[in-house]
Image (cartoon, helix red, strand yellow):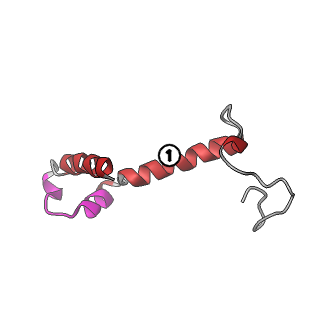
Amino acid sequence: MKDNDLLEKVQYQFIQMFKDLKDLEYSHCLDHLGLWTLEERRNCANLIEVFKLFKGYTKLPPESFFEVDTSGHHTRGHSLN
């Protein structure tokens, strides 16, 4: 958490260089610039990697990270839920 806060602070300091954004809250600055927080970017990157695992775009099998249900039971219409 401490490292995350330090990294967010660096991003916030960069945003403060824009004179039009100096008086806005951090979250409003991010919205105005179309940026995500570092946590949101990490979550997105994780979801992309999970997608790649299940679609076969990596050499690693999904079973090395996830317990895949092979019983044929479908959850909400999709076999990988």
Residue where numbered disc 1 is placed: 45
Q: Quadrant of residue 81?
A: bottom right
- In the figure, residue 49 lies in which quadrant? top right
Any magenta on residue 56?
A: no
Tell me residue 33's x, y (percent).
Answer: 30, 54
| The residue positioned farthest toward the right in the image shown | 72
In the rendered structure, the answer to whether residue 80 lies left or right of residue 36 reads right
- Residue at image position (29%, 59%) is 32
Residue for point 63% across, 46% down = 51
Question: Residue 66's spot in the image, x, y percent?
Answer: 68, 49
Q: Is residue 48 left or right of residue 21?
A: right
SS at mark 1? helix
Residue 22 quadrant: bottom left
Q: Which residues are magenta?
A: 19-32
Q: Is residue 17 left or right of residue 44?
A: left
Number of numbered discs present? Answer: 1
Q: Residues within 10 Å of mark 1 (few under 14, many from 20)?
A: few
Where in the figure is residue 7, as x and y percent of width and height?
A: 28, 46
Q: Main secondary structure of the magenta part?
A: helix
Residue that appears at 70% across and 43% down: 62
Furthest residue to the top? 59
31 falls in the magenta region: yes
Horizontally, residue 80 falls left or right of residue 52, namely right
Amino acid at the residue labelled 1: Ala
Q: Residue at x 37, y 54 (%)?
A: 36
Query: In terms of depth relative to the viewer, which is nearer, 44 or 60?
Result: 60
